[in-house]
Amino acid sequence: MNGHDPRWREQPATWGAECGDVRVRFVGRHAAPAREEALAAVADGAVPRLAWAQQVHGAAVLAARPGACGPGDALLTAERGLALAIATADCVPVLLAGDSAVAAVHAGWRGLVAGVLGAALDRLPGAANGVRAWIGPAIGPCCYEVGEEVAQAFIDSDRGAAVVRRGGWPRPHLDLHLAARLELAARGVGEIHALAVCTRCTPTLWSYRRDGAAAGRNLAFIWRR
């Protein structure tokens, strides 16, 4: 992990961090399939209530409440004891902690181009330089081949050109981890921790590119105790 010591703890297909009263967990394919069961397995004590979204690859930010919160790709809460859940199978899970609230963001390529990270940061109270961010496992530039129209969408965005890779491949590849880091840094986020693990290359994580329709979902959780 990069940056200031976030006290990461690693188990097979599970990564976690504790920073003050904030708890962060990334859980891979060997977790229970149900969100509640997966959270209970990694909560280390009292299990918080859980909120999740119907993820639609957009930039809508939802005020979290226990249970299903509707269509959107970012959740935000200032309520203690309420965990926010994001499900991914190659997209980037980004967890954010501000002075008095936390957010969880599902950032696929469409959401990144649409500005979902900026939309979530705009809703977090306090200055961006006081925000801590954790970027979880996602498909890496080694494996994320895309069409020219997708590459062009990033090139046309503010910081997109650095995200497009044109090595020895017949088609362009994207670095979604880098796209998330660049956006967070450009918005002034003061502390960024990136778990640069490729889902397609890691058999203990689900990957839609590798597993197709049989893919389950990796889970990301953040909450305040």
Image (cartoon, rainbow, N blue to C red):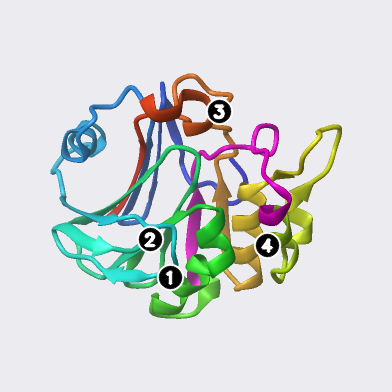
Q: Earlier in the sequence, mark 4 or mark 3?
A: 4
Q: Amino acid at mark 1?
A: Ala
Residue 122: x and y in percent read 45, 78
Residue at 17% across / 57% down in the picture? Answer: 68
Residue tagged by mark 2? 73
Residue for point 33% across, 22% down: 30
On-image quarter of the N terminus:
top right
Tag 4 and tag 3, C-beta contact below 8 Å:
no
Relative image position of residue 149 (x, y in whole percent)? 69, 55
**Residue 21, picture quadrant:** bottom left
Is label 2 or label 4 in front? 4
Any magenta on residue 131? yes
Q: Residues within 10 Å of mark 3 (few under 14, many from 20)?
A: many
- For label 4, the residue is 153
Q: Is residue 139 left or right of residue 215?
A: right
Vertical arrangement, residue 162 with respect to residue 220, above or below? below
Of 4 and 196, the residue lying toward us? 196
Query: Mark 1 sits on what residue?
Result: 120
- Residue that lies at the very extreme toward the right in this rendered image: 168
SS under mark 3:
loop
